[in-house]
Image (cartoon, grey):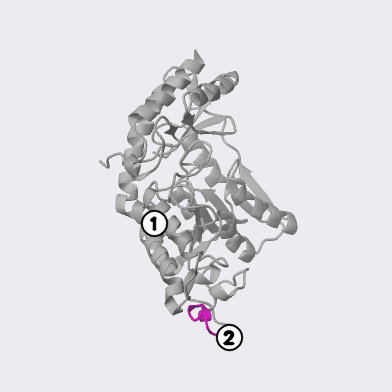
Amino acid sequence: MLACQRHLFSLPEGLHYLNGASRSPLLKSAEAIGISALQQQRVPGPVVGEEYLRVSEELRGNLGRLIHAPADAIALVPAASYGVAIAAHHVKLRAGQNVVMPDEDFPSDVYAWMVRCAETGAELRLVKRPPVTEGLGRAWNEHLLEAIDANTVVVNVSSVHWTDGLRFDLAAIGRRAREVGAWFVVDGSQSVGAAPFDFQALQPDLLVCVGYKWLLGPYQLSFAAVGERLREALPFEQHWGNRASSSNPGSTAYTTEYRPGARRFDGGEHANPITLPLFAEGVRQVLEWTPEAIEAYCASLTAQVQALAEDGRVHMPAPGEHAAHIVGLRAADGAALPRILDALQQRNVRISQRGDAVRVSPYVHNTPDDLDVFCEAVRTALG
């Protein structure tokens, strides 16, 4: 099994950082790269031909390897919402049709379809979380599949629910979407990098993923993996960098030709010379560890949390229903939530509250002791 990697991060002693689902800490190696990049900006050097695109192309190739997709499928975008907009800009909707999503999904996935449905009269079909504590994952996945019908045009789902780590059955949902001819859009922000993802096997029309969580990158750098049905669509942003002439910064000629593959969807100024190398370093390190090893390490940590549910005072998805690296706890007595949050803060445990859930999301920089402190705080708060 992968050993603890805390030595590669600059986390202070005494801090139990269990909040990777919110934002990852920065690698020491990425910090050094960022400082060097800032120093180079003191006196910027000339931008010469393909060198301008070197880091972005290396990153594109590594992202492709990470998710089992060709480099030509990868667009470098500023945010997951930008990625969703690739589909929302292209997909045609009309009254009588519907878009299916899980309720309480991350707002950046929902808002684009909310606006499109309001504009066109289509229905935004948000599938509610079933009111059960046992078999939640099975029930919610079944309800999602039942909601997809002949009038469904888009199915947009996160690989892992951001509040409590519940897994959605992407294989089954994707098959059902293809049966009715619907576009299949996946937000992998809470799993890609921390768990295996096979783009070729799951066949989404679009996968979006932020860089600042499980890919150890900075803000405003994300990626979209674009399926073949969308890859030749017209991008909604027109700029120099997604045109064929962008490899020649000295050219003054205009062109109607886009760069090959999903590069047409790259965000303007994506090749930021300071932040892009940090993202590239994070992805390189994740590939070196491998998502499979990361998942196994995190599973050994979240297994400690499951014992909290034994007496019924805390509810959470069952071990097979939540991601190895995220689990959300909901106290049976809602009044206990403030006490839990206070107990965690007193012990310098960093987590996130998401709705009525206390979300704990460990990573390879955590130790079993971090989870012991978390569990002790919760038990103390419950009394």
| Residue at x 45%, y 18% (from the top left corner) | 379
Predominant SS along the magenta part: loop
User: For residue 251: magenta?
Assistant: yes
- Most extreme residue toward the top, as rendered? 383
State the SS at label 1: helix
Which residue does the image show at 65% across and 55% down from the upper left? 112
Q: Nearer the viewer, residue 269 or 353?
A: 269
Residue 56 point in image, percent of width and height: 44, 66
Q: In the displayed structure, would residue 241 be above or below residue 141? A: below
Residue name at image x 57 percent, y 71 percent: 233
Instruction: Residue at the far left: name it.
Output: 1
Q: Residue furthest front?
A: 43
Q: Does residue 21 appear in the picture of this structure?
A: yes
Membership of 308 in magenta stretch: no
- 169 relative to 365 in the view: left or right: right
Occupied quadrant, residue 50: bottom left
- Check disc 1 and report the residue beneath it: 281
Q: Does 57 sit left or right of 331 as displayed?
A: left
Frontmost residue, 182 versus 276: 276
Disc 2 packing (10 Å; few <14; some 14–19; many ≥20): few
Residue 47 in the image: x percent, y percent? 48, 75
| Kind of residue at disc 2 | Thr
- What residue did someone put label 2 on? 252
Residue stretch rendered in magenta on the structure: 244-253
Residue type pointed to by label 1: Glu
Q: Could you tell me residue 366's position as x and y percent? A: 37, 36
| Nearer to us in this view, 32 or 78 | 32
